Amino acid sequence: MTNIRGNNTTRETTKSIKRISGDLVEAGRRLHRQGLVIGNSGNISARIPGTNSILIKPSRVSLESLKPEELLVIDLQGNKVKGESAVSRETPLHTAIYRTREDVQAVFHTHPPTATAFGIAKIEILPLQIEMFIQLPNGVPIIPFETPGSKALAEKIQNKIANYDALILENHGIVTMGSTIEAACNLNLMVEEAAKIQFLAMSLDGKTEMNLSTLKKKFKKQNLSE
Ligand SMILES: [Zn+2]
């Protein structure tokens, strides 16, 4: 095993690992409390600034009880750099995103019931509510099913994330990413909220036209900077 930066792990890096670990674990608890994951499911990670490594939840640990010191450090090729527990099979999904998008600092993968159901029904989630439109202007597309942890799934995700910060994985769950831990976590909660709103609107009025180009026209005239 090597240090995160060869033999040159700085005091600054150690300090930021401690801070990021605490923030990441706290964000994971939020998602568990909100019912976006149950049991040991879901996976969260954050980039360690100035390194080619990330902190990530290990396999077979619940987001409810995860402790900062249990997080693994892995490099962007998926090799374990630090930690005792087994690496999650969903790790390739995370490393693929960090390799592709240098701006991404955190990735959250969960299995929220409503958003996951949209993926199963093959209905894309739309930002029907105006504040959601600001965060998700292109909606949330569906990545066709691939085996969790597979190279094929990682490749499909890599090919889609140039224009999207949130994806639905068909028959699986969702993935969100952001420039901070808070942004990626909030987006995860927002995708599930958007799915619930869309489901309710569809149940109340099956005639409402729901497509992205109609929404873009409607919201274009608004001052969205509030
Ligand atoms: Zn999963």
Image (cartoon, grey):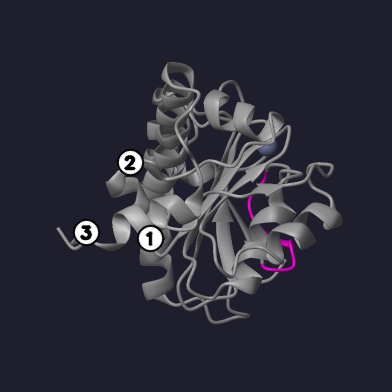
Residue 48 spot, x, y in % from top left: 49, 67
Q: Is residue 14 above or below residue 29?
A: below
Residue at left offset 59%, top offset 70% = 162
Residue at left offset 40%, top offset 25% = 34
Residue 46 spot, x, y in % from top left: 50, 58
Q: Which residue is mark 2?
A: 129
Secondary structure type for disc 2: loop
The label shown at residue 180 is 1
Q: Quadrant of the N terminus?
A: bottom right
Distance of mark 3 from mark 2, alpha carbons? Answer: 13 Å
Distance of mark 1 from mark 3, alpha carbons? Answer: 27 Å
Q: Residues within 10 Å of mark 2 (few under 14, many from 20)?
A: some
Q: Which residue is mark 3?
A: 222
Q: Amino acid at mark 1?
A: Thr
Q: Is residue 205 magenta?
A: no
User: Does the rendering let one see residue 178?
Assistant: yes
Region in magenta: 76-84
Q: Residues within 10 Å of mark 1 (few under 14, many from 20)?
A: some
Q: Is residue 81 magenta?
A: yes
Looking at this view, name the residue that lies furthest to the top: 204
